Image (cartoon, rainbow, N blue to C red):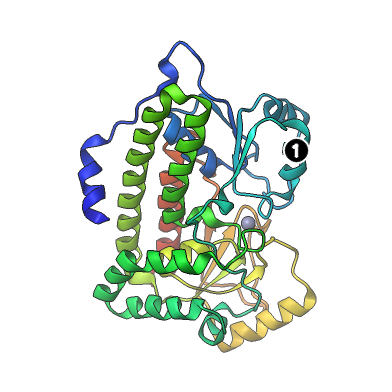
Amino acid sequence: MRAFFVALLGLFTAISATNAQEAGPKVVSDIAPVGALVAMVLGDEEGVSVLLPENASVHSFSLRPSQARNLQRADAVIWIGPSLSPWLERSIENLAPNAISVPLISVPNTLKLTIREDIGFIEHEHHGDHDEDHEDAAHDEGLHNEDAEEDHEGEGHEEDDDHDSMINAATADPHAWLEPNNAVVWLDEIAHVLGEIRPELREIYAANAQVAAGKIMITAAGISEKLADVREIPFLLAHDGTQYFEHAFGVAAQAAIRDVNDATPSVRRLHDLGQQLEDAPVSCVMLDSESGYKEITLPSGEMPDRFGTLRSMGQGQTFGPDLYIAMLNDVADTFVTCLKP
Ligand SMILES: [Zn+2]
């Protein structure tokens, strides 16, 4: 795998397919990181429009009239799926019945993780009763031994593939774009779909997808190194939206205030969270622009020592083919800054 990507280093220029006299396919995406993957395959961002505005919550957005027109003109809607953006499902049926709908979470070989239901994530992972334990065990070894971690990166993915087929796409944690291996799987699918729409550009799309996959894998390797020193430092999430990033890079949230759907926490949840944090204090709290928390007081009444603000939708980045990688690096830097002792 690694040798293959190293061989791609020489091919780092994506070819823009829309230089041809004809316009390329028109694609609508739900969130900017997905739109950026499409732009990587197209070679530029000309043919892609993203529905979710920069500071809106993807879980509770609703479509605007101008966006409806975009949908009506779309050749393809490439999105994570209804579990992330339930507001988009019926709009596709009504407004874009002839567009190809590609819910990426359902693409074969996508790693899907079970939604974390318990308040304390770390406890849950050690006492859970499903297959994931097997893999988590391998993952944990990696935390203490760099060689084991390397092995995990090479071999773990195949295990994941077997494992994830058992998790339903509709009920999996939908924040799956934060696992770079998923982005790599999806690039191939995006190239395939765009090639169906413009068969004469099929080879360009396939080549662009390969180049993009190489860049993402190299970025992921760099992030793994960056996070090596902070993997064991506990943190609290304002919104449970980083499970895939945690899985990919070995950091581990202790708990989340808002759940995977970014629902306002119940009194019960806050109470349990308070107990959880008393037993296992955290030094860093990760806010994000989805959660609506600008600052936070812990259930104990104390202020945490450090905050970070995650921008996992690529907030603050210019939209285009570079956004996905810039977003990954930005999220990684936020972790390093917040977790660093
Ligand atoms: Zn979310």
Q: Residues within 10 Å of mark 1 (few under 14, many from 20)?
A: few
The correct choice, above or below, for 205 with respect to 176 in the image is above
Q: Residue 317: image x %, image y %? A: 49, 39
> Observer-nearest residue: 86 or 337?
86
The correct choice, above or below, for 143 with respect to 81 in the image is below
The correct choice, above or below, for 242 with respect to 126 in the image is above
Q: Residue 309: image x %, image y %? A: 54, 57
Q: Which residue is found at the position 65% from the left and 39% from the top?
A: 53
The correct choice, above or below, for 193 with respect to 33 in the image is above
> Observer-nearest residue: 204 or 243?
204
Q: Which residue is found at the position 68% from the left and 77% from the top?
A: 299
Q: Which residue is found at the position 41% from the left and 49% from the top?
A: 184
Q: Amino acid at mark 1?
A: Glu
Left-right relation of 59 to 332: right
For ligand 1, tell me if the residue under mark 1 lies within 8 Å: no
User: Residue 68 sits in which quadrant?
Assistant: top right
Label 1 residue SS: helix
Would you name the residue on which mark 1 appears? 93
| Residue 300 in view in this figure | no
Q: Which quadrant: the N terminus?
A: bottom left
Q: Which quadrant: the C terminus?
A: bottom left
Report ligand 1 position as a quadrant: bottom right
Q: Which residue is found at the position 76% from the left and 33% from the top?
A: 64
Left-right relation of 200 to 226: right
Q: Residue 109: image x %, image y %? A: 47, 56
User: Residue 62 sits in which quadrant?
Assistant: top right
